[in-house]
Image (cartoon, helix red, strand yellow):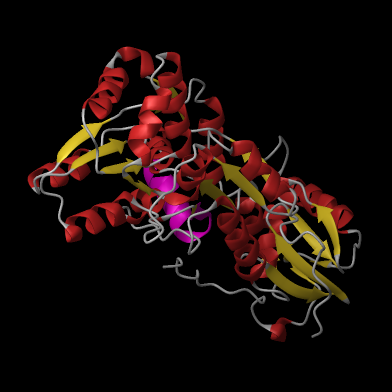
Amino acid sequence: MVRPSAPADPLVGFTVGVTATRRSEELGALLVGRGARVIQAPAIRYVSIAEEGGLLDATRACLAAPVDDVVVTTGGGFRSWLTAAEGWGLADALLDRFSAARVLARGPGARGAVHAAGLYPDDGLEPSTTREILDHLLREGVRGRRIVVQPYGEPLGAFTAALRDAGAEVIEAPVYRWRPAADPAPLRRLIRLVVARTVDAVAFTTAHGVRTMLDVARRDGVEDALLEAFRDSVIAACVGPTAAAPLEARGVLPLRPTAPRLGGLVRELTAYLPEYAVIRVAAAGHHLEIRGHAAIVDGTPRQIPPAPMALLKRLAVTPGAVVTRSELLARLPTRASGSAEHAVEMAITRLRQALGSAQIIETIVKRGYRLATPAAAGPAARAPARRRAAS
């Protein structure tokens, strides 16, 4: 069978949930630009603690004596620190101190903020995780060194304890803390959609966001159902290993790019979903691609309502085989008042209209319905196994 050309936008028909707070608009725009439908559901928010005294004390400690290493974990946190220092009249002195130290920046965002401040991170190391930074420092030896650590929303207890145990003096500079989003309703809605398998993927940019989603699901009594959805059909896409860790600990294998960047995350989803999350079948002389909330018929995207889409996906599991009305009824997400037979007939009618051809779905009298393709065609063309996360 010759496959028709793919749609110009490779994510047409797919729905992706975005849990990010920072750069959520950028991530959403990248996905929409590739044809995806995006559901914004911020999981967390960041609360500045610059005025609580800890950051000012840390700044003064940095200025009290030379420092050897500066660990920057987030670009936003580093910029916020410099803004606060500017308000205290200490920004120039702080930058002078850091310019004489070695700067270790975690990830491209942190490196960009360091460069923007006129500093130069260590070119010999481009770490993606704090674990990589810690291993590097411990291999070199840190005894007697003064090390500044700017955490990313929560204390890095194990990180700083390991440095102190190895003989370093550690100055922690807390800039902000993360808290659950002020309005949990969008996240709760996204969780319900994941459990119902009506989204195709959820993008995570922080471990905090993952843990918050799991916490909310636990309080709502659907944590196990949420994890099961991520294990069997909904893609959990994580920007890097730190974000992926809480899911991996719960038996979920996330999709993640080799390099922890938003662009890489989007590219990974763009490559994965059309290849592994599409059902392809021929019926009544038409080429169908069933993806997310849409079907591509002979290269033309067609939006399919939820109930008809549920029936189409079931029919496509065994193309050519008859599926009974009772089995199709069980696949309907909701059923209006009236007989079971009427509910299925109405959904099939809407499905035929949405597909643009009544011949694609055949009625088998007194038995049920089937896709109009020979039963001998076998299962629809779909890769059942999920590709392993990039390492």
Toward which corner of the image does residue 241 lie, by quadrant? bottom left
Q: Nearer the viewer, residue 227 or 18?
A: 18
Residue 234 magenta: yes
Q: Main secondary structure of the magenta part?
A: helix
Q: Quadrant of the C terminus?
A: bottom left
Task: Please report the bounds of the magenta region as a residue range.
Answer: 223-237
Toward which corner of the image does residue 28 lie, by quadrant? top right
Residue 363, percent across and down?
Answer: 82, 65
Q: How many marks?
A: 0
Residue 256 magenta: no
Q: Quadrant of the N terminus?
A: bottom right
Is residue 295 found left or right of 334 in the rendered image? right
Is 271 rendered above or below residue 11? Answer: below
At horizontal 31% and vertical 49% (from top left) the residue drawn is 130
At horizontal 37% and vertical 46% (from top left) the residue drawn is 224
Is 205 rendered above or below residue 51? Answer: below
Is residue 328 found left or right of 68 in the rendered image? right
Residue 218, percent across and down?
Answer: 36, 35
Q: Nearer the viewer, residue 355 or 294?
A: 294
Residue 347 seen in render: yes
Residue 351, percent across and down?
Answer: 81, 54
Is 12 rendered above or below residue 18? Answer: below
Q: Nearer the viewer, residue 380 or 203?
A: 203
At horizontal 43% and vertical 38% (from top left) the residue drawn is 209
Residue 325, percent across and down?
Answer: 69, 58
Residue 340 seen in render: no
